[in-house]
């Protein structure tokens, strides 16, 4: 009679941010690392903004994230723009 041993690995891991208190739960190591990296990057961006820029960015993100088609079109528009400093 053979007994099947469970595979070793992740059940779940929880990341709690010491700065803002947010909590992320991940079921794989890859998902955990992505969540932690994205959260740390978000803090890095947020820390560089002044209060007016923070309000503006939050407003823009709420608009874009609620309309995926708009996000696609904005990225396409940005990709078609010249890279120089000339206003078109």
Image (cartoon, rainbow, N blue to C red):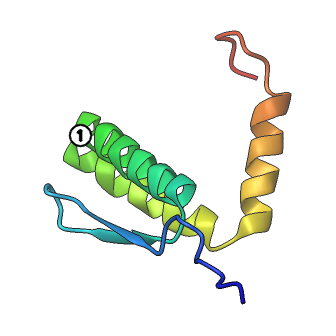
State the residue at coordinates (51%, 71%).
27
Indicate the position of residue 46 as horizontal and vertical percent values: 30, 45
State the residue at coordinates (79%, 18%).
82
How many badges with numbers are in the image? 1
Q: Nearer the viewer, residue 35 or 60?
A: 35
Indicate the position of residue 2 as horizontal and vertical percent values: 70, 84
Q: Which of 34 and 21 is in front in this view?
A: 34
Indicate the position of residue 18 as horizontal and vertical percent values: 14, 57
Image vertical order of residue 75 relative to residue 65, above or below: above
**Residue at the farthest left position:** 18
Image vertical order of residue 61 relative to residue 50, above or below: below
State the residue at coordinates (18%, 61%).
20
Query: Taking 60 as reference, is 54 left or right?
Result: left
Indicate the position of residue 5 as horizontal and vertical percent values: 59, 77
Residue with the mark numbered 1: 47
Q: In which quarter of the image is the C terminus?
A: top right
Label 1 crowding class (10 Å Cα cut-off): few <14, some 14-19, many 20+? few
Query: Taking 39 as reference, is 32 left or right?
Result: right
Where is residue 48, by image quadrant? top left
Q: Quadrant of the N terminus?
A: bottom right
**Residue at the farthest front position:** 1
Where is residue 24, by image quadrant? bottom left
Image vertical order of residue 22 relative to residue 74, above or below: below
What SS does tag 1 mark? helix
Query: Taking 27 as reference, is 65 left or right?
Result: right
């Amino acid at each position: 009679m053979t007994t099947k041993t469970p595979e070793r690995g992740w059940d779940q891991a929880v990341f709690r941010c010491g700065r803002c208190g947010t909590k992320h739960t991940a079921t794989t190591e890859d998902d955990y690392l992505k969540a932690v990296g994205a959260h740390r990057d978000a803090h890095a961006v947020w820390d560089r903004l002044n209060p007016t820029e923070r309000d503006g960015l939050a407003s823009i993100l709420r608009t874009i994230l609620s309309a995926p088609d708009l996000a696609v079109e904005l990225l396409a528009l940005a990709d078609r723009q010249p890279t120089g400093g000339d206003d078109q």
